[in-house]
Image (cartoon, rainbow, N blue to C red):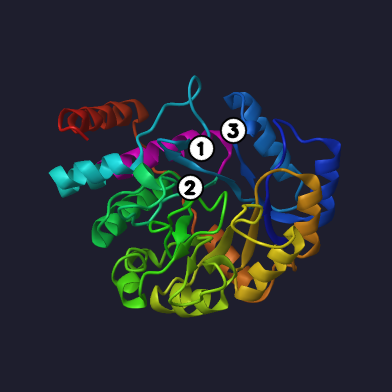
Amino acid sequence: MTKAFITGIVGTTLNADERAFIHAERPWGFILFKRNIENPGQVALLVDELKNCTSRTEVPVLIDQEGGRVQRLGPPHWPVYPPGAVFGKLYDIVETLGLSAARLSAQLIAADLWELGINVDCLPLADVPVAGADAIIGDRAYGTEPKKVAAIAGAVAEGLREGGILPVLKHIPGHGRATTDSHLRLPTVDTPKNELEKTDFAAFQPLAGLPMAMTAHVVFSALDPVHPATTSATIINQVIRGMVGFQGLLMSDDVSMKALSGSIAERTKAIFSAGCDMVLHCNGDLEEMRDVAAGTPELSGKALERANQALASRRRPQPFDRSAARAELEAMMSQARMSGA
């Protein structure tokens, strides 16, 4: 059995305390950050070691590899990928061009991850920014129109899956209107429900069939004036599972982010009480990791079913010529630069 949490670690190798923690607490998966990354050989060894600490054949290893500002793997060992807004600009020139570039970029990212043994990317975003919103989303977003955002997000998800990588849809049901960074404080969105349904939430609806999604640490006061989506049973049941129709594995955004209140143990309890299937802890603080593990149930019931379905949906990578694909993507990016994107 495993517990329903995903954990980070502190460095580029596992230390003895982390190894003992993993053996004892049995997290479902792991997540990597820049602090865990030096070079391809080191990352591949670390991923193997994490997987070998479990008794399972399928072990999710996650990373945030979006391109642009959020890219944990980067030069000199890995290419720089464009931010999401570039695909939106190309889409405005020719829709098929934007979709093709998004899909190709994601497939190339997937090839990078596959070589390392990383099998889950926290991508795509379906957040729809508005004027005056905090820059935490900014050029990570594909645009400001729900239909366009959903189309590009779908192309990104398909590119990842063609490369053998599972996508995680974020930040459901929307972080685009937040006027503050949820890493630092709790954002509150006061937009009326009907407007949210036509814009923010609508962008996620066409993506409801994706295998996994990550919640937004954002209060939507028209639906729940107290709790952010991550800890709101109302939003999870009525919006994420209801209006949006997402039925896959629902994980929290990082439980250690400052948007959430209370102790780590209290936050963990609130996340599961609201209806999330999985809690995510990222910063590698072992004491916090222990608090998360202590408050996390065994992965069972509907959550286990969703987790197994997500893992079972992973495909073998489709063969493709990476050199030709990189040249094709660069040509698309040149077109974007020439158009001012």
Q: Nearer the viewer, mark 3 or mark 1?
A: 3
Q: Quadrant of residue 205?
A: bottom left
Q: Secondary structure at mark 1?
A: helix
Q: Residue 208: where, in percent of width, then height?
A: 40, 67
Q: Nearer the viewer, mark 3 or mark 2?
A: 3
Name the quarter where the N terminus is drawn.
bottom right
Q: Is residue 251 left or right of residue 273?
A: left
Where residue 334 sits in the image (x, y, percent)? 21, 27
Magenta-tinted stretch = 101-118
> Which of the two labelled residues, at mark 3 and mark 2, occupies the earlier sequence position?
3
What is the number of the mark on residue 165? 2
For label 3, the residue is 34
Q: Residue at image x 58%, y 61%?
A: 252
Dominant SS in magenta: helix
For the point 59% across and 23% down, the residue is 39
Q: Is residue 1 visible?
A: no
Q: Which residue is mark 1?
A: 113
Residue kind at label 2, given as amino acid type: Ile
Which quadrant holds residue 173?
A: bottom left
138 vs 273, left or right, is left
Residue 79 lies, in percent from the top left, at: 42, 26
Mark 2: give few (<14), some (14-19) or many (20+) Cα within 10 Å: many
Counting from the top left corner in percent of width and height, residue 100 is at 25, 43
- Foreground of the two, 129 or 118: 129
